[in-house]
Structure formats: C-alpha cells, structure tokens
Image (cartoon, rainbow, N blue to C red):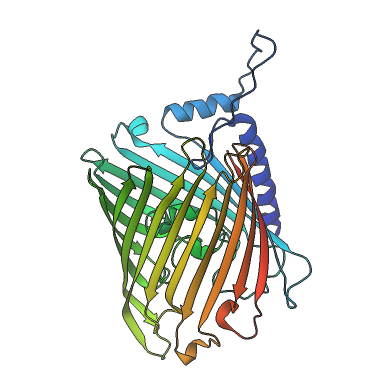
Amino acid sequence: MYPRWSRGFSLLVVATLIFSNSYSSNLCFAQATEAVPAIQQAVTTPSPVVVGPGDVALSDLKSHGISLQNQLIYDWSRAFSDSAPSSGFGRYSYDLYMPVDGEKLLGWKGSDGMVRLKHHMRHFGNDCVGESQLYSNIDANSRTTLYEAWVEQKILSDKLRFKAGKIDANTEFAVVQNAGDFLNSSMGFSPTIVAFPTYPEPKLGFNAFYRGKSAYTAGVGVFQTAGLGRLTVVEPGRNWNVESESLPGRVSVGYWRLDGGTIPQYDGKQTSGAQGFYSVVEQSLYRSKSSSRGVSGFLQLGTAEGRISPFTHHVGGGAILQNPCRKRAKDSLGIATTWIRFTSYPQAGFDFASETVVEGYYKATLTSHVSFVQDVQYFHHPGGLRANPDTPVITPRLVISF
C-alpha cells in the first residue's frame, strides 16, 4: 500500500487536471496536434462569454512570457507467460511544463527557459518479464521531482545556442525524432550510452549548438551523472531533403566519454574513464501530395566497452505510417525492432548473448488533447537469462495533453 502523501498527491494531480481543463483548454502541449475546428453555431447571435479568475491569471502570465502546459500518461501492461500474473498492472506519469519567453519576461532577446515538474507513480502490480530494454518508457521508481530547470540563449541570428541548467540529455542528444510514439525505452536513445542523464534522473549540464545556413549542425554537452563522474557528448549532424519528392532526412554521429569518476569494471577493477559511439539516421520515404499520408523510417546504432557496460552493441530500426486510415488523418502505425548484445564478461552473469524486441503500435488521435496507443511487444531472451522465457507484452497507453 502506498503512503498517505502519495494518495493525497494523486488527488491533487486529478484536481489540477480538472482546474487546468476548465481554465486553460486553449493551452496545448507543445507536441499536441492542431485543434479541431469548432462547429458553427446554428444561432448567429454570439453567446455571452464568462471570464473566470483562472482565465485572467493565465492570460496575464502569458502576456509576460510564461505559459503552463500539462501532460498525463497512463500505461497498463500485461505479459503473457507462465510466470506472469493473470492480471495486468498500471502506472502513470504527470508533467507540468512552464516554458518561459525571456524576451517578454526580461527583455532579453533570443532567450528562453523551462521549468518542468514531474510526478510518477511506479505501478500497481508486478513486472515478471525481466527485460533489459523496458517495454514502457515511463517505468521508474515513484517520485515527485523538479525534473528540468534550464535557460538558453540564441545569438548570431540563432546560429549559436547555449543551454545551461538541469537538462534531460535525450531532448538534445541521441534523439530519434520519428520514434516518439514507440513505447520501448531503446527506441528513444541507444542503451549503450552509459550513465546518460535522461529519464528518470536528468542532471546539471551545459550545452552548446551550432546550426548555420548549410545542412550541417554540431552540438556538445557536458553533464553531471549519477555518481560516475562527468559525461561529455559530441554530436555533429547533417540534414538533407530530396527536393523532387520533399522527403527530409538527417544523420547524426555521437561520441560520449565518461571522466573523473570511479567506474566499476566486471573484472573487479576500477577505471576513471569510458567511451562509446552512437548514430541515428532518419528518412522520410514517402509523402502523398493529396493527403497527410506518409512513410518514414529510422535506424539506430550504438557501441560501448564491455568491461563497464552490460550492453556492448545496439541496433534498432523501424518504420512509421502516418494516416493509415484516410478518415483518420492524425493516426499513425509503427513497427520496429531493437537488439542489444550483452557483454561477454562471465561476471556479468548473462546466459544468452543478446536480447531482441519486436514492437508494433497503433496510435489513435481522439481529439486535439487526447490520444490512445495500443502497443504490442515480443521479447526474445529477455534480460539474457534462461529463467526468463520469451514473452509477448501488451501496453495500452492513454495520453492527455492540454
């Protein structure tokens, strides 16, 4: 049973959702789809508009460059194996975003900021799969935390961008833009990046980015880690477009290095440094000229040193179909696979050399604020252990953004 404060906070979250929906329905999460046009009134005389105190307060904040955005994600999962319980389990993650326009608030041209609070409830059951690549990217220990708090400054006509504060590193590095609706954690970034300060525990960092008129980009980030020293990431990239078909694509190649900490090795020794590489390739493959239908694909690669990392190689890839049903333009359908090779050090205790996951989903956009994802994954050699049988897992996901 969860402590009283946790149940109380859950009620507070529900109350916040109701309040925000009543007074700020015009504020959409940054990744929400466009609002559906309202049906015209049969009566031409406009109805009186009632303005509440919440509308006035939010409008005043927005005029000063501060807005509020909310997102609630609820996952329910069930595994189908002899060791799994007959009933599934659920968990949720709630985010409150506060983007800040520095020019409106302080008169600093080219400046922005973000404060992001997160409340996560772990689960109400047991996970019996034993997988290394999590089948829900919101899985973590229960916590309520200041998740992000950063400021950034753009200069030289936005060619240079600097960012500092508590930052989710995966919002800037190793990003797979087309894979955002997949649920498996490895679709978001390569698990070979050791101590990557992303969900559920971002860290303090400083980032610098260059984006010129050409197709080339470059980024560098220096982050604290959870007890393993300093992580430095360097990521150059290139964008392109197949002009005859208007099909954009991109590639990025990243190098990461850990320094300054005490990193345990599987042979019982310790080291103060480790390194690895990763790469992401994304390409729009087809786009209809008469509708929003399109096909895009992605490929991920990653490497790490087996003496310090449980995963030495990673390969992932998939394809996404937008507008699979012509009457549902905002829906999408995706299929992908992700494979990791485990370290060969006997001390790591793996029975199998690798783990493979195949994932498919269908995302139904119900309104501009509500979407539902039905996700199915199949795990082969989960966790690299003989004790864990191959297992299919289903995870329906509800996303509410406003």
Q: Is residue 388 visible?
A: yes
Percent position of residue 47, x then y: 66, 13
Q: Name the quadrant of the C terminus.
A: top right
Q: Name the quadrant of the N terminus.
A: bottom right
Task: Tell me which corner region of the image, top left, top right, bottom left or bottom right, holds residue 263.
Answer: bottom left
- What's the residue at 59%, 36% (across, down)? 368
Which residue is nearer to you in this view: 262 or 306?
306
Which residue is nearer to you in this view: 103 or 175?
175
Q: Is residue 1 visible?
A: no
Which residue is nearer to you in this view: 10 or 129?
129
Percent position of residue 151, x then y: 35, 46
Instruction: Decide: is 42 above or below 361.
Output: above
Percent position of residue 50, x then y: 64, 18
* Relative side of 225 to 16, left or right: left
Percent position of residue 256, x then y: 32, 68
* Relative side of 39 to 285, left or right: right
- What's the residue at 45%, 88% (across, down)? 344
For the view shown, which residue lies furthest in the top direction?
Answer: 45
Q: How many marks?
A: 0
For the view shown, which residue lies furthest in the left direction?
Answer: 156
Task: Tell me which corner region of the image, top left, top right, bottom left or bottom right, holds residue 374.
Answer: bottom right
- What's the residue at 79%, 69% (across, down)? 86
* Relative side of 198 to 364, left or right: left
